[in-house]
C-alpha cells in the first residue's frame, strides 16, 4: 500500500507541476520561469562531503565525483527533466546516495537542453563525455544510469555506441524512462488520468523542441523501436501511476525477446521518477538499485571503436 507521504507528494504534484504538461503554452511558460532560478551546481552539502571536480565538454560543465580508493567502476548519470529542465537537488541527492553506498566514481554531464539546444547538441556532448570516459575506464566498469528523459538518453547513447562500434557499458539503470516518445499507445490516455505529474500535450511539446525534426518513431527519439539486442543487463523502475509505464512494460518484454537480461521494479501506486523523492518507496527503490549495481560485473563486450554520429539533417526529413 502506498505510504501517506507518497499520497501527499502525489497531491502536490497534481495541483502544481501537472499544469506544466497540460498544454504546449503552459510548458513554455514553465520553462521560461525555470530559466530564472535553475542552478546546476551540486548542493553545498555535497561539495563538502565529496571530492567533486568540474571540467567542460563542448562548453558545458561535467561534474566528477571521485571514486572510493581502489574502486574502478564509474556511473554516467544522465538527469531527467523532459529534455527542457535542468538537473535539480533531487537528482544530486540520489547521486550522492549512490556515491556513498557504492563508492563508484560518478560522472554528471550538464548537457545542453531544449529549446535553446536540440538532439544533436545533447548527444554530441554526452557522446564526447562517454568517449572520454572510455579513454580512462574499461567499458565493463561503466554503468549508464538515468531518470525520465535521462533514461531515454542512456538507451539511445548505448545504441549509438553500438552502431558506431564503440565498447558498450556493462549495465543500465533506468528510472521511469521515456522509451517511446511517439506517445501513440492508446493505453496512455488512461495512464495520463492516473498520472499526477505528466501530460501528453506538454510532453509532445517538449519532444518537438528537442527532437530536431527527427520523427518521433525513429529510434534516436524512441529507442523502443531500435535494436534492443545491443543493450546490457538492465534494471528498469516504473510506477503504476506513471504515464510512461505502459510503454516501459512493452519495452521490457521486447528487450527480453531480444535476449537482454532485464529486471523490472513495477511499484504499485507510484508516480513518475518517485525514487528521487525521499519517502519509504524511494528508499526501497534505492536499495534495489544499490543491490543491482553491487552484483558481479557483466561479461565484457567486444572492444569496438568508432565515432558517434547523430542522424543527418537529410535523414531527419
Image (cartoon, rainbow, N blue to C red):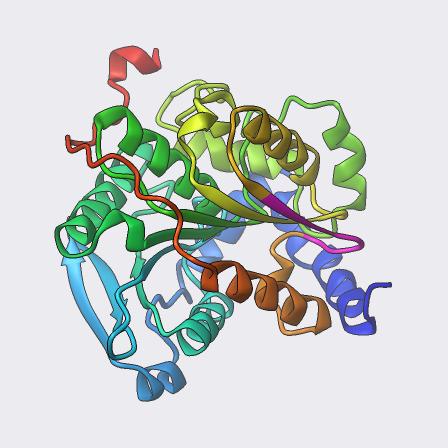
Image location of residue 115, percent across then percent down = 38, 40
Tell me if residue 295 comes above or below residue 314 in the rendering: below
Question: Residue at position x 30%, y 55% from top?
Answer: 141
One can see residue 72 in this view:
yes
Image location of residue 175, percent across then percent down = 55, 51
**Could you say which quadrant of the image residue 109 lies in?**
bottom left
Tell me if residue 55 comes above or below residue 308 in the rendering: below
The quadrant in which the N terminus is found is bottom right
Residue 185 drawn in magenta: no
**50 left or right, relative to 194:** left
One can see residue 222 in this view:
no
**267 left or right, relative to 154:** right
Image location of residue 102, percent across then percent down = 42, 72
Q: Which residues are magenta?
A: 263-271
Question: Residue at position x 38%, y 21% from top?
Answer: 213
Image location of residue 203, percent across then percent down = 57, 37
Q: Looking at the image, how many numbered discs can be counted on the residues?
A: 0
Question: Residue at position x 28%, y 38% from top?
Answer: 123
Question: Residue at position x 22%, y 60% from top?
Answer: 61
**Could you say which is closer to the camera, residue 298 or residue 290?**
298
The quadrant in which the C terminus is found is top left
Amino acid at each position: 500500500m502506498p505510504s501517506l507521504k507518497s499520497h501527499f507528494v502525489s497531491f502536490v504534484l497534481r495541483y502544481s507541476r501537472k499544469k506544466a504538461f497540460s498544454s504546449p503554452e503552459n510548458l513554455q511558460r514553465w520553462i521560461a520561469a525555470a530559466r530564472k532560478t535553475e542552478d546546476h551546481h551540486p548542493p553545498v552539502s555535497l561539495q563538502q562531503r565529496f571530492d567533486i571536480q568540474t571540467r567542460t565538454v563542448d562548453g558545458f560543465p561535467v561534474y566528477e565525483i571521485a571514486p572510493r580508493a581502489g574502486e574502478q567502476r564509474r556511473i554516467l548519470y544522465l538527469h531527467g527533466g523532459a529534455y527542457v529542465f535542468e538537473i535539480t537537488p533531487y537528482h544530486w541527492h540520489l547521486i550522492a546516495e549512490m556515491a556513498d553506498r557504492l563508492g563508484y566514481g560518478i560522472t554528471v554531464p550538464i548537457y545542453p537542453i531544449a529549446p535553446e539546444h536540440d538532439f544533436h547538441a545533447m548527444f554530441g556532448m554526452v557522446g564526447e563525455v562517454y568517449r572520454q570516459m572510455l579513454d580512462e575506464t574499461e567499458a565493463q566498469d561503466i554503468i549508464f544510469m538515468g531518470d525520465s528523459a535521462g533514461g531515454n538518453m542512456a538507451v539511445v547513447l548505448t545504441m549509438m555506441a553500438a552502431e558506431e562500434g564503440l565498447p558498450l557499458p556493462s549495465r543500465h539503470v533506468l528510472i521511469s524512462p521515456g522509451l517511446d516518445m511517439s506517445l501513440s499507445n492508446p493505453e496512455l490516455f488512461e495512464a495520463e488520468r492516473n498520472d499526477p505529474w505528466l501530460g501528453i500535450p506538454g510532453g509532445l511539446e517538449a519532444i518537438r523542441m528537442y527532437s530536431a525534426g527527427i520523427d518521433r518513431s525513429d529510434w534516436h527519439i524512441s529507442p523502443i523501436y531500435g535494436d534492443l539486442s545491443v543493450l546490457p543487463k538492465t534494471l528498469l523502475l516504473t510506477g503504476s501511476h506513471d504515464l510512461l509505464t505502459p510503454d516501459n512494460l512493452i519495452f521490457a518484454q521486447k528487450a527480453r525477446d531480444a535476449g537482454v537480461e532485464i529486471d523490472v521494479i513495477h511499484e504499485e501506486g507510484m508516480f513518475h521518477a518517485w525514487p528521487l523523492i525521499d519517502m519509504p518507496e524511494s528508499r526501497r527503490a534505492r536499495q534495489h538499485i544499490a543491490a543491482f549495481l553491487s552484483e558481479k560485473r557483466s561479461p565484457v563486450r567486444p572492444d569496438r571503436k568508432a565515432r558517434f554520429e547523430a542522424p543527418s539533417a537529410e535523414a531527419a526529413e
